[in-house]
Image (cartoon, coloured by chain):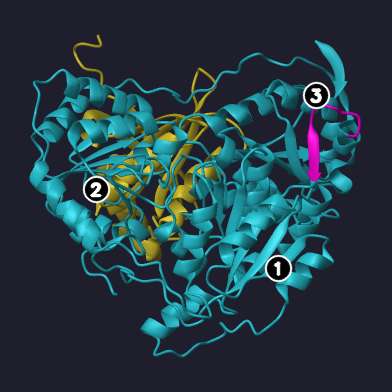
Chain colours: A yellow, B cyan
């Protein structure tokens, strides 16, 4: 099943998130990430990432579009947009040798160490979802104590025509 | 701007929406609102005996009249009792505005007495729902609630009213119109319409399939005109019964699990199927892989979610049925004259004659087919037939010839036992000039028979015809057919005596046991000036046949 990204522009009022998420729950689709931000207009933009086949993805798109408080539901094509995620990682207490190994791996992945106290590192990574996922998986639970992830944020790429 | 209490603002707002009737039952959390209704001469409140009855009555009112039905309850149990009725209205796209009281704002979330989190409960089962958070927004919310309920694909809307929001005062303004982000009219995609015209013009075996959307958009005239122009037979869903007069030579009746065999065969054989305001429900299509296997499918629907949801669609047309059909008609008329698909029509006509359902049984206990036949012989085309749910419903749907839209009312999507009687009550309140008859089963009628008190007290003279087999008949039928006749928990025993039950409430009750007696007793019932219960014992072993087993093919019916 393919990974999908929907961007839902909706009213910023209590219960909207529940209306949207229950449409997934009911169809037993797991939401992998969900982010909310307030647009300059005052409307909320909810970005959802999930896995579904083509038929279900199209159905969910129509179902979300139908909700009374949804102004627009857009299917995001990752190819035509800039999609990023930020992750904060905290390691366990590491040996000196292990710690330097982790520092190298974080820097190689384009991240940076924000803090280090008593051989516990806090690092920041940003990039596309899959790259972050790969680093987190490679480090694994033996090294990582805790992670905090932003979920997907995106901006559509401007075409020549828009400029 | 005027200073009003929330309750007064609400009633003023209802008046602007032209609300004439409310079905409801009061309680602690709606006392301020009922206090305002006490003085209001313009809105008649009909006191039901159970809130489920109020929801179904509002639904029946809406279906019979085309205008939104309104119901009102208190908080907590009053509100939760609306649940089945609201979902029923949602599944059948019926415009209902339901309101219930709520505990005062500052107690919400405290598990206060008679508190239920109705915002969450109603959320998945209504088209939309609101909770009032300030008195000033009440007129806006009411306006929006009616707008949402009655536009696009219609459906129920629930408004939760905390008690303090009814009692407090604020400066309010009753708006003349309200901003609503959803489209209520769609731009017709002319390219799609012309594609449909092309397909229909070339079809050798065209078939039209009309559903509830054809009725809610008042598209009957266009539907019949298009059928006649094309020479296309018309089948319907349960919700579409009455979209075309069923005595029209092109009308083949209902399709599906308990549809007419000729209708199911026509679907299987047609080469172009035009779906009009239908959602291709599983009870109608059977196995979708074998549904209309030879046909290109054109689907007109106002709800994009429905297009392509259950069956593959070749030409989607997003529009209300009336407008789209008018455009297709226009497109076809602009074309050169074309011949009628006479070979197809001859075949259908022949099948129709061969498979015409038999109703002339003389046995005692009576066969339900015979009972329906006699009911039909008495009622004119203006009578509204409402059904309960189960075998009685499918016998009515299969055999009863409906002549007008909004004159056959049945719980389709949810299949709610107990719907028929309160819905009949609502229909009679909406259309007092029409005879209203509930074709009932004993099990289903008992689920809301307490509304006998309501119809007697309010002189709502409906007639209930109970096809009484002392069983939960449809469940029994499935057990007989698919569970080796192991009749588990379906025998309802010999109680109650329905004649005495009617009399206990002050209604008129009578029992009809012999063929030939149904018609005269029904005639008498319609004239007696009281609500009536006719107890009609039927053959307890009769099944609803023919039948497509669940997930089976429409062209392979059990007989």
In which quarter of the view is residue B142 placed? Answer: top right
In this rendering, do the residues under marks 3 and 2 share a single chain?
Answer: no
Query: B259 or A54: which is nearer to us?
Result: B259
Q: Position of residue B192 (x, y in %)?
A: 20, 27
Q: Label 3, label 2: how many angstroms apart (C-alpha)? A: 48 Å
Residue A151 lies within the magenta run: no
The span from disc 3 to disc 1 (Cα, nearest Å) is: 47 Å
- Helix or strand or loop: what does disc 3 sit on? helix
Q: Position of residue B364 (x, y in %)?
A: 52, 80
Q: Is residue A88 left or right of residue B132?
A: left
Quadrant assignment, res B150: top right
* Residue beneath disc 2: A54
B420 and A81: which is toward the camera: B420
At 37% from the left and 28% from the top, the residue drawn is B322
Q: Main secondary structure of the magenta part?
A: loop
* Left or right of residue B379: residue B266: left
Instruction: Please give the residue where the numbered disc 3 appears in the rendered image.
Output: B9
Q: Which mark is residue B510?
A: 1
**Could you tell me how many numbered marks the image carries?**
3
User: Image point 65% across, 24% down: which residue?
Assistant: B143
- For residue B546, what is the image quadrant? bottom left
Structural crowding at the residue carrying mark 2, measured as other residues with C-alpha within 10 Å and reported as few (<14), some (14–19) or many (≥20): few
Q: Which residues are magenta?
A: B38-46
State the separation of the CA atoms marked 2 and 1: 58 Å
The answer to whether residue A90 is visible is no
Q: Is residue B45 magenta?
A: yes
Structural crowding at the residue carrying mark 3, measured as other residues with C-alpha within 10 Å and reported as few (<14), some (14–19) or many (≥20): many
Chain designation of label 3: B
Looking at the image, do the residues carrying marks 3 and 2 touch, with CB atoms under 8 Å apart?
no
Q: Answer with left or right where residue B349 lies relative to residue A34.
A: left
Q: Secondary structure at mark 2?
A: helix
Label 1: state its secondary structure. Answer: strand
């Amino acid at each position: 099943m393919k990974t999908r990204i929907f961007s839902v522009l909706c009213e910023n009022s209590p219960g909207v998130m529940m209306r949207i998420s229950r449409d997934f729950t009911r169809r037993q689709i797991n939401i992998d990430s969900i982010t909310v931000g307030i647009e300059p207009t005052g409307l909320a933009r909810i970005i959802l990432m999930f896995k579904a086949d083509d038929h279900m993805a199209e159905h969910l798109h129509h179902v979300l579009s139908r909700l009374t408080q949804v102004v627009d539901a857009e299917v995001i094509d990752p190819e035509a947009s800039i999609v990023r995620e930020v992750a904060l990682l905290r390691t366990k207490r590491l040996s000196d040798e292990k710690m330097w190994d982790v520092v190298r791996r974080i820097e190689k992945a384009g991240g940076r160490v924000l803090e280090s106290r008593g051989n516990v590192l806090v690092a920041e990574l940003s990039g596309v979802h899959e790259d972050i996922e790969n680093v987190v998986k490679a480090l694994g639970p033996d090294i990582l104590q805790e992670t905090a992830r932003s979920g997907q944020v995106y901006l559509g790429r401007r075409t020549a025509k828009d400029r | 701007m005027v200073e009003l209490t929330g309750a007064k603002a609400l009633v003023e707002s209802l008046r602007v929406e032209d609300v004439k009737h409310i079905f409801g039952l009061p309680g602690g959390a709606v006392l301020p609102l009922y206090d305002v209704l006490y003085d209001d001469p313009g809105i008649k409140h009909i006191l039901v005996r159970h809130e489920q009855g109020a929801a179904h009555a509002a639904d029946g009112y809406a279906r019979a009249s085309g205008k939104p039905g309104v119901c009102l309850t208190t908080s907590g149990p009053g509100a939760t009792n609306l649940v089945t009725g609201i979902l029923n209205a949602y599944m059948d796209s019926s415009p209902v505005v339901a309101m219930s009281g709520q505990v005062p704002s500052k107690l919400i979330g405290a598990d206060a007495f008679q508190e239920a989190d109705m915002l969450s409960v109603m959320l998945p089962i209504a088209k939309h729902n609101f909770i009032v958070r300030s008195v000033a927004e009440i007129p806006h919310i009411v306006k929006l609630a009616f707008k949402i309920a009655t536009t696009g694909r219609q459906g129920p809307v629930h408004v939760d009213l905390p008690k303090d929001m009814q009692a407090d005062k604020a400066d309010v303004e009753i708006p003349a119109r309200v901003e609503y982000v959803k489209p209520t009219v769609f731009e017709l995609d002319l390219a799609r319409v012309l594609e449909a015209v092309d397909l229909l013009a070339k079809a050798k075996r065209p078939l039209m399939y009309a559903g509830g959307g054809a009725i809610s958009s008042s598209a009957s005239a266009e539907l019949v005109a298009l059928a006649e122009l094309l020479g296309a037979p018309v089948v319907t869903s349960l919700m579409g019964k009455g979209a075309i007069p069923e005595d029209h030579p092109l009308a083949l009746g209902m399709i599906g699990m308990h549809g007419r065999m000729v209708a199911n065969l026509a679907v299987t054989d047609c080469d172009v199927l035009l779906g009009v305001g239908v959602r291709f429900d599983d009870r109608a299509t059977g196995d979708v892989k074998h549904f209309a296997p030879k046909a290109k499918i054109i689907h007109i629907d106002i709800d994009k979610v429905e297009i392509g949801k259950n069956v593959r669609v070749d030409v989607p047309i997003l529009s209300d049925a009336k407008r789209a059909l008018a455009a297709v008609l226009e497109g076809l008329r602009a074309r050169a004259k074309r011949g009628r698909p006479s070979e197809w029509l001859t075949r259908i006509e022949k099948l129709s004659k061969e498979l015409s359902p038999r109703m002339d049984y003389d046995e005692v206990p009576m066969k339900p087919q015979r009972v329906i036949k006699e009911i039909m012989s008495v009622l004119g085309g203006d009578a509204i037939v409402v059904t309960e749910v189960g075998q009685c419903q499918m016998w009515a749907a299969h055999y009863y010839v409906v002549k007008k839209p909004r004159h056959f009312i049945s719980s389709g999507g949810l299949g709610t036992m107990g719907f028929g009687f309160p819905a009949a009550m609502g229909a009679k309140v909406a259309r007092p000039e029409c005879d209203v008859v509930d074709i009932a089963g004993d099990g289903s009628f008992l689920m809301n028979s307490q509304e006998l008190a309501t119809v007697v007290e309010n002189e709502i003279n409906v007639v209930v015809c109970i096809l009484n087999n002392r069983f939960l008949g449809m469940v029994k039928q499935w057990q007989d057919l698919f569970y080796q006749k192991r009749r588990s928990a379906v025998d309802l025993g010999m109680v109650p005596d329905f004649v005495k039950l009617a009399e206990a409430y002050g209604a008129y009750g009578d029992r009809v046991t012999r063929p030939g007696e149904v018609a005269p007793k029904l005639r008498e019932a319609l004239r007696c000036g009281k609500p009536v219960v006719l107890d009609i014992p039927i053959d307890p072993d009769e099944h609803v046949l023919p039948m497509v087993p669940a997930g089976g093919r429409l062209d392979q019916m059990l007989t």
